[in-house]
Image (spheres, rainbow, N blue to C red):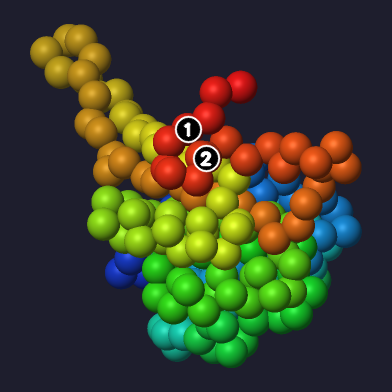
Amino acid sequence: MPPIALPHDAKAGPTKAEVRAVTLSKLALEADDHFVEVGSCTGAVTIEATRRAGRVTALERKDERLETTEKNLAANADSVRADVELRNAEAPEGLPEDADALFLGGSRNVEAVLDHAAETGVDRVVMNVSRLEVAGRATEAFRERDLLEEVVQFQVSHGYELAGATSFDSENPVYMLVGSATDNDADGDDGKRVAADGGGSQR
């Protein structure tokens, strides 16, 4: 599948392509899924989701960013497969009740959004964070609602030519929180890899 086009930018910038790839892997979207994004900004994750899910709902509280989402979505119209709804709303008020997968692109109202996810039984919840302190608070918010399955920290570097050789520029690290409000394991092992005290369990 060719890369998406993002001809229109927003001040916050898009989620980087490599981060989107990991995000989408964790969301594991299928053709009958309803995917919801909180804070669509440039629309990068929303557009990727429209290629995989059956329905996509994107929330953005800022008018100018929602307009950017809409323009970038239109630029990728040929590859959009999902039914798409863009909402100028702030979560949790604008969240639908029937999401299968939820992505949080920012930390605003995270506790209330996670409350909604827990109450409505969202199967897959992913949140990306770039600031350490916010990542810590978000991890606790996931854990307190018994949503947390995995915390992933990763960093991407891009090569550039330096004196006839290759050096690297590093992007900011990303902390990815992965969770679920459903129990998918009939054997009673919920598959969670983050211990209650914050330590990682061994498998």
Q: Residue furthest front?
A: 197
- Asked whether residue 157 appears in the rendered view, the answer is yes
Identified by mark 2, the residue type is: Val
* Residue 64 image position (x, y, % from top left): 41, 83
* Horizontal and vertical percent position of residue 122: 72, 64
Q: Quadrant of residue 21?
A: top right
Residue at 70% x, 60% y is 181
In the figure, is residue 65 to the left or right of 50?
left
Q: Which corner quadrant of the image does residue 186 belong to? A: top right
159 is higher (above) or lower (below) than 32 = above
Tag 1 residue:
200
Instruction: Check the image and report above or below for 189 versus 203.
Output: below
Q: Position of residue 48 (x, y in %)?
A: 63, 53
Residue type at the position of mark 1: Gly
Q: Residue furthest left?
A: 163
In the rendered image, the quadrant that contains the N terminus is top right
Which residue is nearer to you in this view: 150 or 196?
196
**In the image, what residue occupies the spot 59% across and 89% down?**
93
154 versus 113 height, above or below: above
| Residue position for label 2 | 194
**Residue at horizontal 57 percent and vertical 36 percent from the top:** 193
Q: Nearer the viewer, residue 42 or 58?
A: 58
Element assignment for label 2 = loop
Q: Are marks 1 and 2 in contact (CB under 8 Å)?
A: yes
Q: Quadrant of the C terminus?
A: top right
- What secondary structure is found at the residue carrying circle 1? loop
